[in-house]
Image (cartoon, rainbow, N blue to C red):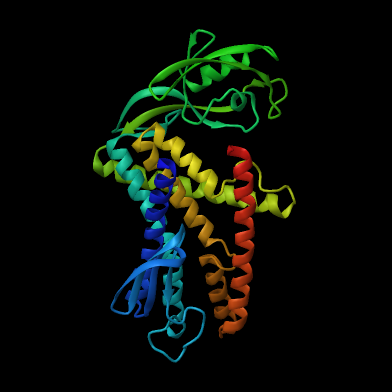
Amino acid sequence: MITALLFIAVLAVLVLAHELGHFAVAKWSGMRVDEFGIGFPPKLFGVKRGDTEYTVNLIPLGGFVKIHGESGEERGDPRSFASKPLFKRFLVLIAGVSMNVLLAWVLLSIGFMTGLPTAIDGGDFTGGDVRDEQVQITYVLPGSPADTVGLVLGDRVLSVNGQSAIDADQTRSLIGLAQDGEELEIAIARNGQTDPILVTVAPTQIEEGLIAIGTQLTTVGFVSFPPHLALVHGATSTANMVALTARGFWDLIGRLISGQGLGMDVSGPVGIAVLTGEVADMGFVYLLNFAAVLSVNLAILNILPFPALDGGRVFFLLIELVRRKPVTPKIEASVHAAGFALLMILVVLVTYKDILRFF
């Protein structure tokens, strides 16, 4: 129950920021906003202020802003979306994505002011402070020996067969010295408790002759900066996060086109909820960082040129720019409806995969 509430709270913040971007720029552009909704219908309750009804809806997995004339109708109404110049409509459509990137920057900057868990291998932290260096598990391959014995994201590796874990490279070397099928005793710290865990190593498919247990190990330290540097490092980290996330989506699209499927790394609402609980157990600052990651993912997802997403609507604006006239509202609405249906099918498939994986 606590995990579900945390997930809903984090999602609400991300969605609120996204929709607030659309809402604010639409208002600035002189458009009439009919509804600002958190969650998807059916509606639980709402309050009307001016032209806008602010609603809370039953399904807590998103949100929306209903702008007058956004589907291309009411072009004669000066307060409709369709009547505004193309550049104003473009600004409204990208405002949600921009707000999610801005939110990630704010969250990461706050984290760097207080001390953010950061991969410190080869990093430059001039002007900052690094404390509590540790070897941490930052990924567990599903179905791997590590996954089988219960190692999870965030576990701190203390030793391997009695030899202290100094950094990620040295710890990987200790594991790599084992023989195929050998059982290692790995001491890990989790939730304030230290436990020895026995795990059997196996050859990895990544590199011939390499022995592994199916984890990604990273040397992590809590890095903090004075406010002015925290803002700079927050911006840099956000830019890197955007680039890595965009590459991840590009790879995912490539897998789908080539028929390779979604892969095990893709998670839907159920998987993200489970991860939210695991990250929250590690501490508030980890949750802060995770929220920034989700915010960037939401931004990149929405800017994809797919029908029903912000990027899909931007794509229709580009068509209008080339044709010098808009696509008819009926055609655009049909394309977006079909895109939304495909998205819902994808969500169902990913959710089913999450249920099989986590339960």
**Residue at left offset 48%, top offset 44%:** 273
Q: Is residue 196 left or right of residue 50?
A: right
Q: Quadrant of the C terminus?
A: top right
At which x and y percent is residue 131? 32, 25
Q: Extreme bottom residue here? A: 76
Image mark count? 0
Q: 216 or 155, which lies in front?
A: 155
Up the image or down, 51 lies above or below 120; here it is: below
Query: Which residue is more in the foreground, 310 or 322?
Result: 310
Provide residue 293's location: percent of width, then percent of height. 45, 46
Residue 346 position, x and y percent, is 63, 56
Q: Is residue 179 left or right of residue 197?
A: right
- Residue 330 can be seen, yes or no: yes
Residue in the image at 36% along x and 44% along y: 108
The residue lying at 65 percent from left, 53 percent from top is 253
Residue 176 appears left or right of 276: right
Give the residue displayed 41% in from the left and 58% down from the top: 15
Question: For residue 287, which quarter of the picture?
Answer: top left
Is residue 214 something that shows in the picture?
A: no
Q: Quadrant of residue 213?
A: top right
Residue 5: percent from left, percent from top: 40, 46
Among the 4 quarters of the image, the one containing residue 221: top left
In the foreground, 318 or 280: 280
